[in-house]
């Protein structure tokens, strides 16, 4: 084995040269600089996410009501969920909202992105108009849409009257039509945001693939189905995951638009958690409902990841 020479030092064969003191200082300095960048993120995650989540799981096994200690009740909160009809209603309404809202918003945002991805006059203006509802105050949106949905004086029912519908839906005043009304507003508000994601995804579709398909005689629909959709799979997967999580934890729109009513027709799990926690101070029971919602989101997301992985294989 050859002798190793570093600078003015000679090392025996098989012995790794020791790093000089300036080299160790530089490595230590780089390590400290790296930690200064990532440590605030770790601290913020621990204080704002990890600790509250761990506390949530602990509180779900107690009957804490803000005042005094938190008595340990074991699985009582979870067994109570089995006989809680309001929880069952909120769970079904949440599933109803998610099952309808996810595909409708996905299709609407993709269609909007395809339309605004063309070269036409005023495309920047139309993109801004489509995105504007997402950054508008949710309270203002709820007030305006409640006026539009007014059964007697709202322009929507007046327009339906022109089409021959004499008795229009009661919308937010009807137990049957309140959830569809919320779904319409929720889709209208969020499709602009997901349109931007699809627009970014459409920019990554190679034009050569479309040109090759066109030369092979593929029509517009065939190019869309066999070229655009496969190339948009990563974007579609991301949008689906974000839509799923957002749909299961919908809260603010329903709170300011219908407040869960009429009756419990639009009561969802997030609002039920709010009612039990901050309305009735049953934080232990509200924590148990939160754990159920957390597990639903985790399981659905894991299923989506596995399904997407299988399709990519």
Image: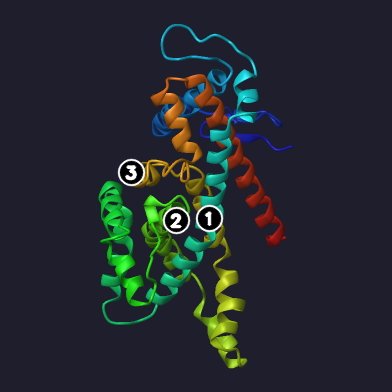
State the separation of the CA atoms marked 3 and 2. Answer: 17 Å
Q: Secondary structure at mark 2?
A: loop
Q: Position of residue 21 (x, y in %)?
A: 47, 25
Is the residue under label 1 in contact with that under label 3 (CB below 8 Å)? no
Q: Earlier in the sequence, mark 1 or mark 2?
A: 2
Quarter where residue 259 is shown: top left
Q: Position of residue 255 (x, y in %)?
A: 37, 41
State the separation of the CA atoms marked 3 and 1. Answer: 28 Å
Q: Which residue is mark 3?
A: 256
Q: Position of residue 30 (x, y in %)?
A: 43, 33
Looking at the image, residue 76 lies above or below residue 44: above
Position of 208 with respect to 4 (left or right) is left
- Looking at the image, which residue is at 58% across and 92% down? 215
Q: Secondary structure at mark 3?
A: helix
Position of 11 with respect to 52 (left or right) is right
Q: Residues within 10 Å of mark 2 (few under 14, many from 20)?
A: some
Looking at the image, residue 42 lies above or below residue 231: above
Is the residue under label 2 in contact with that under label 3 (CB below 8 Å)? no
Q: Position of residue 243 (x, y in %)?
A: 50, 53
Q: Residues within 10 Å of mark 3 (few under 14, many from 20)?
A: some
- Rendered-image quadrant of the N terminus: top right
Q: Is there any visible trace of residue 249 in the rendered image?
A: yes
- Looking at the image, which residue is at 60% across and 46% down? 301
Q: Earlier in the sequence, mark 3 or mark 1?
A: 1
- Looking at the image, which residue is at 30% across and 69% down? 158
Q: Which mark is residue 100?
A: none
Q: Which residue is mark 1?
A: 238
Q: Which mark is residue 177?
A: 2
């Amino acid at each position: 084995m050859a002798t190793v020479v570093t600078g003015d030092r000679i090392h025996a064969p098989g012995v790794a040269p020791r790093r000089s003191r300036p080299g160790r200082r530089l490595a230590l300095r780089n390590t400290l600089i790296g930690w200064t960048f990532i440590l605030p993120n770790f601290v913020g995650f621990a204080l704002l996410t990890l600790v509250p989540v761990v506390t949530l799981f602990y509180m779900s096994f107690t009957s804490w009501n803000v005042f005094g200690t938190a008595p340990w009740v074991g699985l009582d909160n979870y067994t109570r969920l089995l006989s809680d009809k309001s929880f069952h209603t909120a769970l079904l309404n949440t599933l109803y909202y998610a099952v309808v809202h996810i595909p409708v918003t996905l299709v609407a945002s993709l269609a909007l992105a395809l339309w605004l991805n063309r070269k036409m006059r005023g495309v920047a203006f139309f993109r801004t108009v489509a995105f504007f509802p997402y950054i508008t105050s949710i309270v203002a949106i709820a007030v305006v849409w409640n006026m539009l949905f007014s059964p007697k004086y709202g322009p929507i029912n007046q327009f339906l009257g022109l089409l021959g519908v004499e008795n229009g839906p009661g919308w937010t005043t009807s137990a049957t039509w309140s959830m569809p009304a919320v779904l319409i507003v929720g889709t209208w508000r969020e499709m602009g945001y997901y349109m931007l994601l699809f627009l970014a995804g459409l920019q990554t579709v190679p034009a050569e693939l479309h040109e090759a398909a066109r030369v092979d005689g593929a029509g517009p629909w065939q190019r869309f189905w066999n070229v655009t959709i496969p190339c948009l799979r990563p974007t579609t997967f991301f949008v689906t995951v974000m839509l799923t999580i957002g749909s299961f934890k919908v809260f603010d729109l329903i709170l300011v638009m219908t407040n869960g009513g009429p009756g419990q027709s639009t009561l969802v799990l997030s609002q039920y958690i709010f009612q039990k926690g901050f309305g009735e101070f049953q934080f232990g029971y509200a924590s148990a409902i939160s754990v159920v919602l957390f597990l639903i989101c985790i399981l659905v997301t894991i299923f989506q990841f596995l399904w997407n992985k299988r399709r990519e294989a």
